[in-house]
Image (cartoon, rainbow, N blue to C red):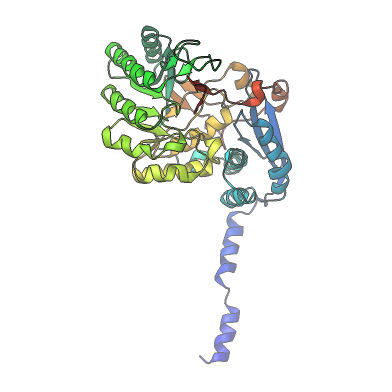
Amino acid sequence: MNRRNFAKTLAATPVMPALANQEYEKRTRGLPPLTIKDVKVITTSGGRRYRWVFVKILTSEPGLYGIGSAANQYQVDAIVAALEKSLGPWLIGKDPGRIEDLWQSAGFRTYWRQGPVNNNVLAAMDMALWDIKGKRAGMPVYELLGGKTRDAVACYDHAGGRDRESAVAAVEKSISQGFRHIRVQYGSGGYGGGGFIPPGKGSRPEGGYSGPAFDEELYVDTIPKVFDYVRAKVGFEPKLLHDVHSHLSGINAVEFCRRMQPYQMFFIEDVLPPEQLAWYRQIRQVCATPQAVGEVFAHPYEYIPLITERLIDFVRCRVAAIGGITQARKIATLCEFFGVRTAFQEGGDNDPVNQMASYHVDISSTAFGIQEENQFPPQVHEMIPGCAQIRSGYLYGSDRPGLGLDLNEQLAAKHPLEPFPRGGAYQTDRAMDGSVVKP
């Protein structure tokens, strides 16, 4: 074949991209192109002093929309402004099906990326986009992530007491309700309970702080004795957890974990603040007490070294705080490669939308470890139909298309946000000399 005939033949032959486009059009015939038409920001107290921010992304297909959560009760006003003034207008006209592309470009469009507010905003968008994709496909989101890898999502319960006897009673109550995993806190001081010197007691600076003072050494001495008593009463069948809430530093954290090893903990949570992560190497050298880390992480570089060096056993992030389902499933995949498990965070301030987003990642990931329990009052189930249900220690989703729930805007509007004390600040503990204890 000469060059001229070859050129004619080439011109007459359909090129591969054209064939691919024809095939794509055939497979998607009947589904018109989607665009984002509006982004609504919905705030509500849920009838119980919650401070919830939801996003509703509406598309060009009538009746097709997605719901997402930007759960962060301490920076609500900043999140609302970022959604209404910045992200929302930018999303108008874009294709909601391009989740990964929108996730990447939305993350970089602020130039200074990561950070709590940016991650919350990104997460709300991301959840809503997955909700839309699942609804359009007629499938729950977990089916789009590969399908179920378990029948339900195991949760841990919350128990605690002002003294050893009431702590045991609380654990026994959780067991009777079907929970196998139980987090045990102690004392009347909230996080750090068991490590507080009473108000006005102890050696203090003149005219200084007089409130309850956290003392690391007291905590390290007290809590292991509490768990010794609890294990003596309930045995080793229940899987026990404990949250230090970043109250310890350096060698005290190492010594605490060493002392807790005989009680076969399911995990110790955040024994160190994120500013002191290097100490996890020392913990690994002296004991095998499992570590759960990451409730206040905002950047992947915080948890990537901990996972890849196998310095922790559970990644403890909130899906709404790390960028949504897209980021959570990437974390779960990384965990799978290195034998680390997920323990996505809820907390009493969280909402059913974030909980359901966590559920879809949990139930579709082989790296799943445990999920924090969070139950909501009846008015929330009415306001957000399709909420997940917790029965006998397991979380069950609705299995409807998308995330599986909806948001009644009229009911949400009946419960507006209330003013938050102290300007929305998280209340920190203090040491004997009045210095701040890291939360």
Which residue extends farthest front? 206
Q: How many marks?
A: 0
The residue nearer to you, when weighing 341 against 296, is 296
Res. 138 in view: yes
| 74 vs 157, nearest the viewer | 74
Q: Is residue 59 visible?
A: no
Query: Residue 128 or 319: which is nearer the viewer?
Result: 319
Q: Could you say which quadrant of the image residue 224 lies in?
A: top left
- In this rendering, the answer to whether 338 lies above or below 368 is below
x, y percent for residue 10: 56, 81
Residue 356 position (above or below residue 37): above
**Residue furthest to the top:** 165
* Percent coordinates x, y for residue 329 in the rendering: 47, 43
Classify residue 405 by image quadrant. Answer: top right
Residue 220 x, y percent position in the rendering: 35, 21
Residue 1: % across, % down: 50, 90
Instruction: Work out whether residue 237 or residue 93 is closer to the camera in this orientation and state it.
Output: 237
Side of 219 where 87 appears, left or right: right
In the image: residue 112, left or right of residue 213: right
